[in-house]
Amino acid sequence: MTEGADDGLNERAQLLLKALIENYIRDGQPVGSRTLSRDSGLSLSSATIRNVMADLEDLGFVASPHTSAGRIPTDKGYRFFVDTLLKLKPLHHEEIVEIERRLKSDAANGRSLVQSVSQMLSSVSHMAGLVTLPNPNYVALSQIEFIALSENRALAIMVMNNREVQNRVVQLDRYYSTEELRRAANYLNEAFAGRSLPDVRAQLVGQLQETRQHMNQLMQDAIQMAQKVFNTEPDGRVEYVIAGETNLMGFAELSNVDRLRRLFEAFNEKHDILRLLDSCLRADGIQIFIGQESGYRILDDISVVTAPYMLDNQVVGVLGIIGPTRMAYERVIPIVDVTAKLLGSALNARK
């Protein structure tokens, strides 16, 4: 085989590899030389095609299943296809409008929106859709109020990002009247509204280090209350919602009962998936993990396509589609990319 610039593949070999992968993605069956002769658009004899296929197999781009004379792509073959040969299919305007409509019609609660997006990704791809919840480090405090409870306790009611309500019961050092709680809340709202929780914690530490001579009693009370409310640092762990796992049962290469059981266990236990998603949070743009590229054995027959979504120009989460390595990348990648951008826009619009 005459070597070309792209990983040793000349144009003829690339066209045959492209035809093989497109056929296998569509039909899920090993591809023989007769099919390649018909679909590649090249006027080549079956013997020439078999020689090229043998070279591709030697280079690790295709493999021969024991049960067939045809060949199937390897992870390396898929990677070359995605990086070099793939032509993406942009979403139709009607599809984009439908995604926007679903995002706008969903309830304001963040988890509900994430659940809706994961289900939408699953329904449009016929695979599994996955969306992480927004990173708690980027949740901003909009408003806080206190309600007095018995035994020197108070209920802190916090509105986050102007839409999500969180409640926490805090144990105070003494009894506070309703008026004292109201004044403390007013002070905290003036000092911290609109700031992220890590920023609030950092300011609290700074203010608590000030000498008491520089703080009146109201400020001392408010800062002490806030310290009790916000004294728990988030552990930084990614949480995600997944939908459509059972769609994976429809792919022959994933239909082995034991393999499916282990895969579903991985979805439930989340450890490997979470580590993979955490790496996506720190990366730029679309991430594509094909088979063994993920580094997790349970995902050896799986591809994961992810994209980050943003709030206030900060990456706060990722979403993606999980399916077999023979997924239709030319469609899945635009779906993931566009949905991530539209989810970010929806979150920013709800602030």
Image (cartoon, rainbow, N blue to C red):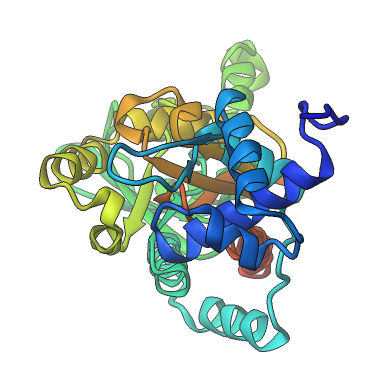
Which one is in front, 6 or 153? 6
Q: Which residue is at 66% across, 79% downward?
A: 96
Exactly how many numbered labels are in the figure?
0
**Going by the image, does 68 lie left or right of 322?**
left
Front residue (pair 242, 194) = 242
Residue 171, by quadrant, is top left
**Residue 285 percent location from the top left of the image:** 71, 43
Give the answer, above or below, for where 349 lies relative to 341: below
Which residue is most to the bottom? 94
Q: Examine the rendered structure and indicate whether residue 260 appears above or below residue 23.
A: above
Q: Is residue 167 visible?
A: yes
Give 38 or 322, whichever is nearer the viewer. 38
Q: Quadrant of residue 197?
A: top right
Residue 200 in view of the camera: no
Write the residue at 29% across / 64% down: 247
- From this view, report whether residue 213 is shown above or below residue 277: above
Residue at image x 41%, y 37%? 64
Look at 41% across and 47% down and name the residue there: 181
Q: Position of residue 176 (x, y in %)?
A: 32, 41
Q: Position of residue 48 (x, y in %)?
A: 67, 44
| Quarter of image, res 214 | top right
Look at the image and tell me in which quarter the N terminus lies.
top right
